């Protein structure tokens, strides 16, 4: 197989960023990662299509027919095809599986003129069922991207985003690719958020669930008997308890879930970034450093816990603390009192282009 012969289909959850609010099953980090990687594959000359679905909780908590909800379109998703499905137990699995299989067969992969490759981002049971059925009709290679899901045992190749998961996985054809350096938006204002004077800004961007570790940030306030700093938080769906803590302490500001250009403004204003992932939450040992890749692009100090999902190469680029509020508070005080002690990122994440090249070369080697 030659590079120009790769006819690729990417399967995964997808929302346009502008349409994501209100979809609690959507992961902004996963969408951002997929968008950058898929674009890099296309820019590497790969003929690629994206078959996607919009995940939602089962009806009536979620939408009965998610695919009928309008969403904004862009030039980026011109090669995108959405799977329609009935969002009720049993029928969701069946309709997603049939919809995916129908789209694959409609792309004429069975004519023998190309070497099709299906790449799935995580693999729920309906994906595995679809692959099993399609293999009876179509000759193709299946590469499974394993983020935080369960790795199937019958893929032709595996891409692990987590370094620890990659090491533990007992598969022969596997690689570790955690992504690339996210592009910075160099336009915008350099003013500090809210014109805060003489205060250092610590930025956290992400979820508010227990796996994200934002509670460590709130806990650290109990041990910080000073007000020469500001925690700036962004991300979707804070809990009521979080909003109450934010309103009760002037040292925290919540900016909501931001568009990419607004988020870049926040990153530009930051003095430090915080990645507070805990280690005692189920499946967090498999997390990958999507947030760190975003932070490190800005060449500012990153305060981070250490989890097994991180590549050891990042260790010397981070200001490490134990996953507790007291440990974070101690590190923050140290940095505020002695800014020169901060570790700056010196290892720049690889580019998305080079990550795409690695994946392409991996596909070419799969027997």
Image (cartoon, rainbow, N blue to C red):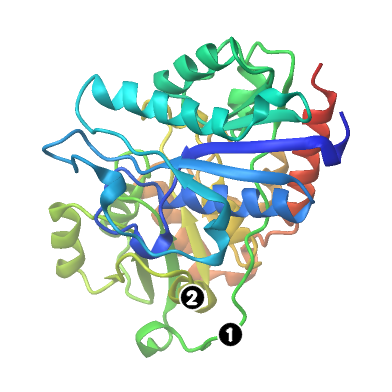
Taking 184 as reference, is 325 above or below it? above
| Residue 3, percent from left and from top | 85, 39
Taking 168 as reference, is 4 above or below it? below
Query: In the structure shown, which secondary structural element does the residue marked by tag 1 occupy?
Result: loop
**Quadrant location of the C terminus in the rendered image:** top right
Q: Are marks 2 and 1 in contact (CB under 8 Å)?
A: yes
| Residue 211, percent from left and from top | 36, 38
Query: Residue at image x 18%, y 39%?
Result: 64
- Residue 210 in which image quadrant: top left
Query: Residue at image x 61%, y 67%?
Result: 300
Query: Residue at image x 36%, y 48%?
Result: 326
| CA distance for labels 2 and 1 | 9 Å
**Residue hosting label 1:** 187
**Quadrant location of the N terminus in the rendered image:** top right
Which residue is more in the foreground, 242 or 110?
A: 110
Which residue is more in the foreground, 139 or 273?
A: 139
Check residue 261 in the rendering and tell me which mark sits there, or answer none. 2
Check residue 122 in the rendering and tell me which mark sits there, or answer none. none
Instruction: State whether residue 351 appears in this view.
Output: no
Classify mark 2: residues with Cα within 10 Å, few (<14), some (14-19) or many (20+): some
Instruction: State whether residue 362 appears in this view.
Output: yes
Classify mark 1: residues with Cα within 10 Å, few (<14), some (14-19) or many (20+): few
């Amino acid at each position: 197989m030659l590079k120009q012969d790769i006819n690729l289909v990417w399967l995964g959850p997808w929302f346009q960023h502008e349409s994501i609010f209100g979809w609690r099953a959507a992961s902004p980090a996963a969408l951002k990662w997929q968008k950058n990687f898929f674009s890099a594959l296309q820019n590497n000359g790969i003929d690629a299509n994206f078959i996607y679905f919009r995940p939602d909780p089962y009806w009536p908590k979620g939408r009965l027919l998610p695919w009928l909800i309008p969403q904004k379109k862009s030039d980026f998703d011109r090669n995108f095809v959405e799977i329609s499905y009935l969002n009720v137990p049993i029928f969701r699995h069946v309709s997603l599986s049939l919809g995916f299989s129908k789209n694959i067969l409609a792309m004429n992969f069975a004519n023998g003129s190309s070497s099709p490759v299906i790449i799935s981002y995580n693999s729920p049971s309906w994906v595995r069922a679809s692959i099993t059925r399609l293999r009876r009709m179509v000759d193709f290679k299946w590469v499974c991207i394993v983020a935080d899901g369960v790795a199937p045992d019958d893929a032709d190749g595996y891409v692990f985003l987590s370094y620890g998961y990659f090491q533990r996985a007992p598969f022969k054809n596997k690689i570790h690719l955690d992504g690339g350096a996210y592009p910075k938006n160099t336009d915008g204002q350099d003013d500090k958020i809210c014109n805060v004077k003489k205060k250092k800004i610590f930025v956290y961007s992400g979820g508010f669930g227990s796996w994200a570790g934002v509670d460590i940030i709130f806990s650290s306030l109990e041990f910080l008997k000073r007000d020469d700093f500001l925690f700036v938080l962004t991300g979707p769906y804070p809990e009521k308890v979080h909003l109450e803590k934010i309103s009760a302490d002037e040292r925290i500001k919540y900016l909501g879930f931001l568009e990419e250009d607004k988020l870049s403004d926040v990153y530009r204003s930051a003095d430090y970034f915080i990645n507070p992932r805990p280690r005692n939450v189920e499946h967090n040992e498999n997390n990958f450093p999507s947030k760190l890749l975003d932070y490190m692009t800005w060449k500012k100090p990153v305060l981070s816990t250490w989890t097994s999902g991180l590549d050891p190469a990042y260790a010397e680029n981070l200001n490490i603390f134990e996953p507790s509020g007291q440990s974070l508070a101690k590190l923050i005080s140290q940095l505020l009192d002695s800014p020169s002690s901060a570790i700056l990122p010196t290892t720049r994440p690889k580019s998305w282009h080079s990550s795409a090249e690695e994946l392409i070369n991996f596909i070419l080697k799969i027997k």
